[in-house]
Image (tube, rainbow, N blue to C red):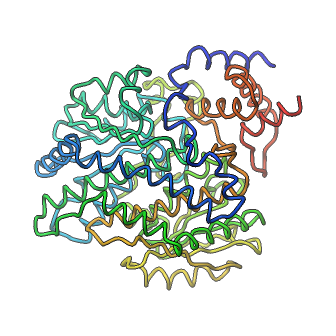
Amino acid sequence: MKEKARTAARNFLENETEFHLGFLPTEQSNPITRNLDRAFASATAEGVRLLQRADREVLPMARRIFASEEFRRMVEAGVRTVKGGGRIVFSGCGATGRLSILLESMWREYCVTHPGTLRADSVASIMTGGDYALIRSVEFFEDYQSFGRRQVADLGMGNNDMLVAITEGGETSSVIGTVKEAVDRGSAVFLLFNNPAALLRERLVRCREVIDNPAVTVLDLCCGPMAIAGSTRMQATTSEQLVGGALLETILAELRPELPAPENFADAFERVLGFLESADSVAAIAGEIDFEAETYASRGKVTYFANDYLLDLFTDTTERSPTFMLPPFRRKDDPAAVPSWAFVKNPCYSTRETWQHMLRRAPRCLEWTPADYTAMGAQDKIIAAPPHIGTGDLYQMEVGNEPAPERHTGKEDAAVLVLIPGAPGNPELVAAFETAAAPYPVHRTLELRSGAADSPLGLMHHMAVKLALNTISTGTMVKLGRVAGNWMSWVDISNKKLVDRAIRLISELGKLPYEEACYALFDAVEAMAQEDWSNREKPSPVQYTLARIDRK
C-alpha cells in the first residue's frame, strides 16, 4: 500500500469522525427491503411492492408533522414573509437542492399562469453548487459550510426573508452553512431533516450548533431507514417534498381565500400511495422497469421527452449518476465522454428556452473565481482548478429540441414520451415528440397518473411522479445487479459522507472491520487513479475494492 493512500485513510479514520454516519437511521439498512434484490429476481412486481411498502413509512410522519406546532409556526411565518414583501427561500444539497428548485418552480408556475395574484419571486431556492447541480452533481460542495454561507449572501437574504433549509440526514455541512448565515442576517429560519434530532445533537457538533440555536425552528421528519440503504433521494426527500409542498399550498390558500381550502395533506398522500399500489399501477411500473433494464443490458440508451414535468425528471435522472455510479449527462463540448444511460429533453423549446420555461426565471449558476474559493477555505485542488458550473456550462447540456444524434446510434436506443394526463402543455408536447423521436429506433409512452384531485400547485401530481420515477429507476438498477440486498453496491465517493458509506458497504460485503475496509478503499482509489478510463465507464470504487479483496 502506498504511503499517500495510507495517510489519506488514516486521516479519514482519525480526523473525519464527524462524517462516520453509520449510527444514523437514514444510513442504515431497512428491514422491510433487506431482500430487495431477491424480490426483484423473483418477479419485478414483487420488488415494486416491496419498495412501495417502504414509501408507506412516510405516512405516520406526515400525520404527526401536519398536526404539529412547528408546522403551524412555519406556515404563519411564510404568510408574514410574503405579505411583507420578503422571500421564502428553500435551501438544500443534492436531492434536497433539486427539491428546493422544484418547490420554487411550482410557486412560480402558478404565479406566472395566474398573473396579478402574487409575486413569483416571493419564493426562491438555493441549490448547493447552483442550478448547474440540478443536472450534474457537484457532490464535494456539500462538505463546506462556507459555500452555503456564500450562496445565502449572494442571494442577499435579510431580516425580511425566511429560510427553509432541507437536509435529509440533518448533517449536510453546506445546508448548515445556509442556516447559520441566514440566522446572522436576521431571517426567520426553519430546518427540516429526517433523523432523530436528539441523536444528531448528541453525536455531531455541527448539528448541535443549529439545533440548539433558539433562532432555528426544527422539524424532525424522521421516517426510518431508506428503501435503499443511505439513498435519501427516496423516502427522506419524499417526506420533505410533501411537507415543503404542503407549506406552499397552505400559504397560497391563506393569501387567496377565494381558492378552495386545501384537503388534509396526509389523507391526499395516502390516496396517492393507494393508487400507485393498485394492480394496474404496479403492472405498469414493473413493465417500465423491465423495459429499461432490458434496454440498458443491451447497451441501449433512454431519452425521456417531457415538458410541464421536466424538472421532476431531472430530479430523478441526475441522482442516478452518483447513486449507482452511472455516466453523468454529457456536455456537447465533451464528445469523448461516455453518453449517459438516460437523458432528458424538451422537444418544444431550445435549451435556453427550456430553462426559462422550466424555472420561470433565468438560471442561477455560480461564477466563483479562485479568489472566491480561497476566501471560503476550499482545498488547494479546488482553488487550482475551479469546477465549471457557470451558466455557460449549464447550456452545454442540450436539454432542448436540438438534434442529439449520439442518443440514437444503436438499435435499442429509445425515445420515451412522459405524459401526465391533464398537463396543459400535452398537445404541444405530443406533436413535438413525433418530430423529435423520428430518428430513434424505439418509441414508447410512459403515462404517469396520481389518482389525486387537482390543487393550485399540483402537489399530489408531483408526489406521484416522484414516487413512480424513484421506483422505476431504483428497480431498474436492482435488476441490473447494482444493488446487493438493499445496499447500493455501486456508489461514487465524491464527498465525505459517501466515503463513509462506501467503507461500511465494503465492510459488510467484504466481511472486514471498518478500519480495514477504509484502508482497502483508499488503496483501491489510488490504484484506480493509475488506470486510463478514456471511453469506458469507470467502475464503482466499492466494486473495484471488493474485486481486489477477492483476488487477494
Seen from the viewer's position, the closer of residues 185 and 497 is: 497
Seen from the viewer's position, the closer of residues 207 and 41 is: 41
State the image coordinates of residue 303 (x, y, percent, origin top left): 61, 68
Seen from the viewer's position, the closer of residues 287 and 275 is: 275
Q: Quadrant of the N terminus?
A: top right
Residue lying furthest right in this view? 551
What is the total number of numbered labels drawn onto the structure image? 0
Q: Quadrant of the C terminus?
A: top right
Relative to residue 306, is residue 411 drawn left or right? right
State the image coordinates of residue 272 (x, y, percent, origin top left): 40, 65
Q: Is residue 362 above or below residue 9?
A: below
Looking at the image, which residue is at 21% across and 36% down? 187
Relative to residue 99, is residue 16 drawn left or right? right
Looking at the image, which residue is at 81% across and 33% down? 530
Looking at the image, which residue is at 42% across and 78% down? 421
Quadrant of res 446: bottom right
State the image coordinates of residue 126 (x, y, percent, origin top left): 37, 44
